[in-house]
Image: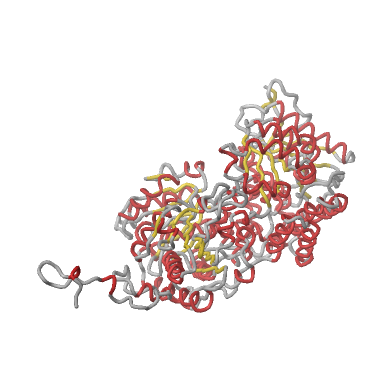
Amino acid sequence: MTPPEQVREDGAVALDWDRIGTGDSEALLRPRDIYAGLAERPWPYLRHEQGEVLDQWFDHRRHDRDVVIKQNTGGGKTAVGLLIAQSTLNEGIGKAVYLTPDNYLVKQVREEAARLGVATTDDPYDPAFLTAQAVLVTNYQKLINGKSTFGVVGDGREPIDLGVVVVDDAHAALARTEDQFRLRVPVGHEAYDRLLELFAQDLRHQSANAWAGLEDKDPTALAPIPFWAWADKREEVLKILRPHRDELAFKFVWPLLAEVLHLCAATATTSAIEIRPSCPPIDRIPSFVRARRRVYLTATLADDSALVTDFGADPALVAKPVTPGSAADLGERMILAPVALNPDLDEKAVRVLARQFADGDQDGDDVVETEPVNVVVLVPSDRAAAAWAPYADRTWRVGDLEAGVKELQAGHVGLVVLVNKYDGVNLPAGACRLLILDGVPRPLDAVERREAVALADSTVRLAREVQRIEQGMGRGVRDGEDYCAVLLLGAKLATAIHEARHLALFSPATQAQLKLSRDIAGQIKGEGLDAVRQALRACLGRVPQWRERSRRALAEVRYAEHGTVRGEAVALREAFDLAATGRTPAAAERVQKAVNNLGDGDTALRGWLREQKAAYLHLTDPVAAQQALAGALNDNAFVLRPVNGGAPVQLKAAAVQSRAAAEFLAAQYRDGTGLRLGVQELFEDVVWGEEERSDDAERAWQQLGLHIGFASTRPEKQYGTGPDNLWALSAARQAVVELKTGCTTDTIAKKDMDQLGGSVRWLNDHNPEVEAVAVMLHPSQVSDARATAVPGMRVVTPALFEKLKETVTSYAAALASSPDRWADEQAVRDQLTHHKLTGDRLFTTYSEPVRTS
């Protein structure tokens, strides 16, 4: 009999749908079934690749605590992550959190969830989340901070128990997580001055020049506080910092670092003292650490080691990623680097070409070859954006992205420049048809800047750069049906898709597209921009032959079966966890095992690891720590110097300049294109008027010396005193070089002149047998009236530097003109002599005497 409340006024029965089709059956668990059960599906079926990944996870990996899911950019990872979260809720495992890099992406994920019928909230206090009825979608910072609403160890609150945490854009999560565990004590703050005073003697002893830079407010100054001083004065440090723990600059980080402060690396700059642990103490966020499932969604992590070091993920589980059966789900991309095709191509002409495609590319008879397209340019800085200003319709920064991307997706805008946004931006279909990368983001964090010097040639550093490049290249294709042409500007980016060491670090699908693009590049190599234009037309004009070959290139590509987890990364994580619980001798031993396993391959990394070992050793055996550090210095000249210093090694000139140059070039380059790109990259790294590029300029100058056969070092970085660069021009003469490329003054200031004079005296003290040739790179050859010029000094001004650049570029081009010519000592000798690059003529040709004002 029908209950009275179910009878409508007209006598018909009103159905109670809440009681229909439920019975005793359990909620749907399999993600594919959850999707199939939707009343209104956004797509008739899940993509094949999405279904494969979800089935693998559900059938084989859902009970694993850490799971890495890899799909190509645009492969539908967001839907995969949301369906996994919903499956976990349905299974009754616990609450679900979906983390994104920023609030812009929080909104995007929630919109996708609404289409999928997945209930979400962005409020961690929402009862729907707390009762496991909805997925919390929020940014990383909401979970990982010292005042986290999820609970922090020691704050007296019960941590929120989580069933699953989905980490979207895991590559972006890494950088933001590291930032959350970094304490910045800003200049001008009382604690900054007190810390600097506390460590003044230690900093002076470690590097007199770096200390002078701090005193002079030089924005490029970088002074690591020696680990032994930091550890020995930990109580004084605590007294200085703890009273400020509730201030805005401190309160979100202090609870995360307070217990491991003695294990942190501290670095002083003129803007802040930065304090950061070698691995984030992620255990301070118990909700994340205890979550039953942690799922990392990533497209571009070729090296998965950082998931272990930053999140404490299980290395054995990380090494078994869940992937689709085929990597062919990536959209079409033609990837070209104009300067690799023809090193003489002008970047300004490339900008004009980009503008033409934005307006609608035409042939010589004004016939439109391609319709107007949206061109998106990714640049790392405002300075790089300025070069595009005459050609751009829009220039957007992070705050403009939401409205800007909508405008691109709505229709034709033209040429748009995005500043320092290489991830987290979706530009599907017509939103971006021509994508241009003009540089990659540079390390800004003080610890990263130090790593950039110490690990400059290490594969570890290289992998990070390639990851950033691949992230950027992925912005323009969002699914298998999408297409986009990609141009890479500059020698650094061109090298990344040319040299074997770099290429091996890209994902398999990107490697396949690069190989196809190289086949095209091989046919237009040496040609001008018209050839580049024709190639781009094939992609943007949907030429059938290009489409067929593009699909075929990806058809058989498979994802890597195993993830890359470097042994030393696992060791650093395990060592930090041991040290954090007071077992520092075991921590040092764990790092030493990683050093032993490295062998003789990556000496820079080996030295860097031995410094980490010494830092742990110091806490129980300071003498052994200093001995270990002395050994580290043998492997890597840019690690900290021991307490007793270590006398500078006298620089010995090459017996024969041309032989040294030929041997260096032969070891460095496998083909002529690589040689020309390598030389061009050196000169790109010397940027006049940009102080933050000083380290790059110094390294480039050192490398330039090696390219032309001089023994070349960076004493100031190696010994903390002496010149920026030292070149052995001959057995009897050495060039003492100070680089002031960041200066913008009309004259050479007294302090800069005094620095050069001090560096000359340093050489005279350490190697009195040689003549010092004083050289300065400076925008002016005129000495300030208050300065005393160094006797006989030479100045390389921007105009003369440009002349030197043209000459060395010609030298490289001549040697690259036939196979292995750069390895021929006689050929190199002829070119060095012809271009006046020999030790006795170089500075008389490419520098000028200083003038008094």
Q: Is residue 169 left or right of residue 479?
A: right
Q: Quadrant of residue 843?
A: top right
Image coordinates of residue 816 in percent, x first then y, are 64, 60
76 or 801: nearer the eye? 76
x then y, percent, for residue 170:
53, 60
Q: Is residue 661 visible to the viewer in this orientation of the structure? A: no
Q: Quadrant of the N terminus?
A: bottom left
Pick whichever, 86 or 717, lies toward us: 86
> What residue lies at 80% left-to-right and 61% top-to-bottom?
589
In this picture, residue 762 sits left or right of residue 112: right
What is the total number of numbered labels drawn onto the structure image?
Answer: 0
Work out whether residue 148 or residue 403 is closer to the camera in this orientation and state it: 148
Q: Residue furthest right?
A: 769
Q: Would residue 448 be visible to someone looking at this image? A: yes
Q: Colour scheme of this structure image?
A: secondary structure
- x then y, percent, for residue 652: 84, 49
Instruction: Report x, y in % for residue 95.
Output: 47, 62
Front residue of 49/514: it is 49
Q: Is residue 363 left or right of residue 147?
A: left
Q: Is residue 16 left or right of residue 400?
A: left
Vertical side of 458 occupied by 391: above or below:
above
Q: Quadrant of the C terminus?
A: top right
Residue plotted at (56% across, 38% down)? 248
